[in-house]
Image (spheres, rainbow, N blue to C red):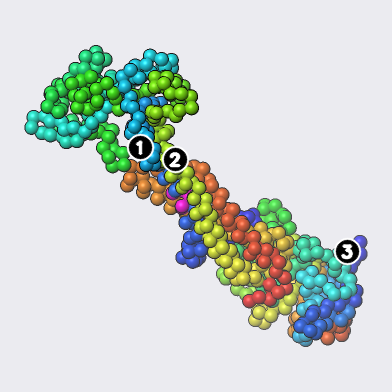
């Protein structure tokens, strides 16, 4: 009942002095808004990076054997060492496939930007991939029509192609591309399938590609003979991928006759590795967040303390009446702390609403799947209550210490 | 158990005022029995407000003893005094001192809240108290929706809610016109007749005339303590 009264008193203050109260709650409001919005955006970013970036560019439970790491900001010296490394050759790929015990699927892979033409129309700068048949599973490419090329076609190096959405859209615009012959680097390729739309990543299309068998005639325009850009290995689970990765490392080191103290002269690129840069950024954000949130909450708390001191001054007589009727110190203390906590919690609730609004705005206007983290909402409410209680202690103590005779004399 | 509700022995109260000391009470002894109706009179500066604050347990004496309803209260802590105020004393103030944002019922419930009475019991007792002062039909009204006389009745109901040992009224008619004053004084008379101990602090002789016993203070001492001559004559 007393708690209910104190909450009612706080809400009454808010109701009668809307504008003033809004400004007094703005510190807590901004702090909590920040908390909710940043957490949801960073988490959305995490989902986006893992889902779209890592899994599209590298593949789920997949790693790539490369000459040098992808997605990395290297120093000048590192770069100089990397370009001197040997490329991955067929023999190395074959011995990986032969000696790795963990069940996995494999594909050689090269890429080059070339033009693709069909009946007088031209698609410029298309990513031409030469790869083995498992690439469609490794890259999780869904077909919208036709079929993928068969292992037999791949082995024979037949001139067949599976086209990305942008290519079929740009060259064929409405016409079914499956069964047509496109020209790549002067040679005709029979389109046997087309891939469903994958969308964009940071505004760059993921659909501007054509996949042809690794040993197709185009190979010499895309890759240096006997070598490959990447060798893809996909296992069934993250754990198996780790095992396969270590097995592959051993096979490669044996192949390259590296002594134990020599470092790897090849790279094993995982999705996690690709996320390294982003993980650094999100770690920085999560370190800076508490500091930024606390600053606004402390400012907000001081403003609330000020409001409560004013309330105590304005209601001195009321405090006197309550004391005359038998209110003990702790009754008055509790009343004003609850009132302060209520004010602050209302501020936090408004902050949560604003934060959720911001997250939805980001979701609606950008490709980020910004999602509200329930724990951040819980934390927001908790912080609201805590700030109110903490900064309510001083005003409430002053109220509780008032002398009833003096207080009753107050006009 | 003794019939004495209040037993005051040689009470003094001094306030430091800058370098000097103001002696508001210079040794007052007073005994009040159950169901007495006492008026405390005196000009301003006589110490009657100080005595009222001491009787009402809002203040503690510099020296002397004060027994209220069998308890020595003159050396009690703040919280213990708060408990005594809550249980033993019903205050009625000149300016009513109702909480403006609370209804009549909520105002009357307030001392019961601090007394730790359960919500249902609180409501029942508050309603009974409002019925006793003839305001059963106004329980939902806020103070600003009530007349001065009605406000003071709410205040009296609030004072009665915890069935206190004494009803302590400080100039209860000071803010009311004479007709309303009479009406409020009749409420006090009725309560006294029902067995309530009433102590009224006033400087007006015709208000004090309702009491059975009149104590006059002057310069911090009791100048006279006698039965009301008008009632004695009647």
From where the camera sits, is residue A311 visible?
Answer: no
Residue A194 lies, in percent from the top left, at 22, 26
Q: Residues within 10 Å of mark 3 (few under 14, many from 20)?
A: some
Element at label 1 = helix
What predominant SS class does the magenta segment belong to?
A: helix
User: Is the residue under label 3 in contact with that under label 2 (CB below 8 Å)?
Assistant: no
Chain letter behind tag 2: A
User: Is the residue under label 2 in contact with that under label 1 (CB below 8 Å)?
Assistant: no
What residue is drawn where x is 85% and y is 67%?
Answer: B75
Residue extending farthest to the left is A120
In front: A164, or A70? A70
What residue is drawn where x is 39% and y is 38%?
Answer: A78
From where the camera sits, is residue A305 visible?
Answer: yes
Element at label 2 = helix
In front: A307, or B40? A307
What residue is drawn where x is 27% and y is 27%?
Answer: A110
Q: CA distance from mark 1 to mark 2?
A: 26 Å
A256, above or below B55, in the image = above
Q: CA distance from mark 3 to mark 1?
A: 98 Å
B216, above or below B106, in the image = below
Question: Which label number is shown at residue A167?
Answer: none
Q: Are labels 2 and 3 on one chain?
A: no
Q: Earlier in the sequence, mark 1 or mark 2?
A: 1
Q: Residues within 10 Å of mark 1 (few under 14, many from 20)?
A: few
Element at label 3 = loop
Residue segment shown in magenta: A33-37
Chain letter behind tag 1: A
Residue A147 lies, in percent from the top left, at 23, 20
Question: Which label number is shown at residue A279?
Answer: 2
Q: Residues within 10 Å of mark 2 (few under 14, many from 20)?
A: some
Q: Which residue is mark 1?
A: A80
Q: Which residue is mark 3?
A: B70
């Amino acid at each position: 009942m007393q708690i209910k009264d104190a909450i009612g008193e706080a809400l009454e203050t808010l109701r009668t002095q809307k504008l003033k109260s809004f400004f007094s709650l703005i510190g807590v409001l901004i702090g909590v808004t920040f908390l909710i919005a940043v957490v949801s955006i960073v988490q959305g970013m995490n989902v986006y990076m893992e889902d779209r970036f890592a899994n599209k560019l590298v593949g789920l439970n997949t790693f790539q054997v490369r000459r040098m790491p992808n997605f990395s900001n290297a120093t000048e010296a590192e770069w100089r060492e990397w370009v001197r490394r040997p490329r991955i050759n067929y023999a190395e790929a074959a011995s990986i496939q032969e000696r790795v015990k963990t069940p996995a699927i494999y594909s050689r892979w090269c890429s080059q930007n070339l033009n693709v033409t069909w009946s007088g129309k031209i698609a410029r700068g298309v990513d031409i991939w030469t790869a083995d048949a498992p690439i469609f599973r490794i890259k999780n490419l869904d077909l919208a029509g036709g079929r993928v090329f068969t292992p037999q076609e791949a082995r024979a190096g037949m001139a067949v192609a599976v086209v990305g959405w942008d290519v079929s859209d740009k060259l064929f615009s409405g016409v079914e591309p499956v069964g047509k012959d496109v020209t790549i680097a002067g040679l005709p390729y029979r389109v046997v399938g087309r891939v469903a739309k994958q969308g964009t990543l940071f505004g760059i299309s993921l659909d501007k590609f054509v996949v042809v068998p690794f040993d197709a005639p185009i190979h010499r325009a895309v890759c240096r003979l006997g070598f490959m850009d990447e060798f893809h290995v996909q296992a069934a689970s993250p754990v198996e991928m780790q095992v396969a990765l270590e097995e592959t490392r051993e096979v490669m080191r044996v192949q390259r006759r590296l002594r134990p103290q020599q470092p790897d002269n090849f790279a094993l690129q995982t999705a996690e590795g690709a996320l390294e840069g982003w993980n650094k950024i999100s770690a920085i954000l999560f370190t800076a967040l508490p500091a930024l949130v606390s600053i606004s909450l402390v400012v907000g708390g001081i403003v609330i303390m000020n409001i409560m001191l004013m309330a105590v001054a304005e209601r001195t007589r009321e405090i006197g009446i309550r004391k005359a009727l038998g209110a003990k110190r702790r009754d008055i203390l509790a009343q004003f702390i609850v009132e302060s906590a209520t004010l602050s919690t209302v501020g936090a609730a408004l902050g949560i609403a604003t934060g959720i609004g911001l997250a939805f705005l980001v979701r609606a206007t950008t490709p980020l799947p910004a999602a509200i983290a329930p724990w951040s909402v819980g934390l927001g409410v908790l912080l609201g209550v805590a700030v109110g209680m903490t900064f309510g202690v001083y005003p409430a103590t002053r109220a509780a210490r008032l002398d009833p005779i003096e207080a009753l004399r107050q006009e | 158990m003794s019939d004495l509700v209040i037993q005051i022995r040689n009470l003094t109260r001094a306030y430091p005022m800058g370098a000097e000391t103001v002696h508001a009470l210079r040794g007052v002894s007073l005994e009040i029995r159950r169901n007495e109706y006492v008026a405390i009179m005196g000009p301003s500066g006589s110490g009657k407000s100080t005595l009222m604050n001491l009787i009402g347990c809002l203040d503690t004496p510099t020296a002397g003893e004060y027994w209220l309803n069998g308890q020595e209260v003159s050396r009690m802590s703040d919280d213990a005094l708060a408990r005594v105020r809550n249980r033993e004393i019903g205050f009625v103030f000149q300016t009513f001192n109702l909480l403006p944002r609370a209804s009549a019922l909520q105002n009357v419930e307030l001392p019961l809240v601090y007394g730790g009475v359960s919500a249902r019991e609180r409501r029942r007792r508050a309603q009974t108290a409002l019925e006793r002062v003839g305001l059963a039909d106004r329980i939902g009204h806020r103070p600003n929706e009530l007349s001065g006389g009605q406000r003071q009745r709410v205040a009296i109901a609030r004072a009665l809610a915890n069935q206190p040992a004494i009803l302590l009224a400080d100039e209860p008619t000071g803010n009311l016109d004479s007709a309303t004053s009479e009406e409020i004084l009749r409420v006090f008379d009725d309560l006294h007749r029902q067995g309530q101990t009433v102590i009224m602090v006033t400087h007006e002789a015709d208000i004090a005339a309702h009491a059975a016993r009149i104590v006059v203070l002057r310069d911090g001492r009791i100048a006279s303590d006698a039965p009301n001559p008008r009632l004695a004559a009647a």
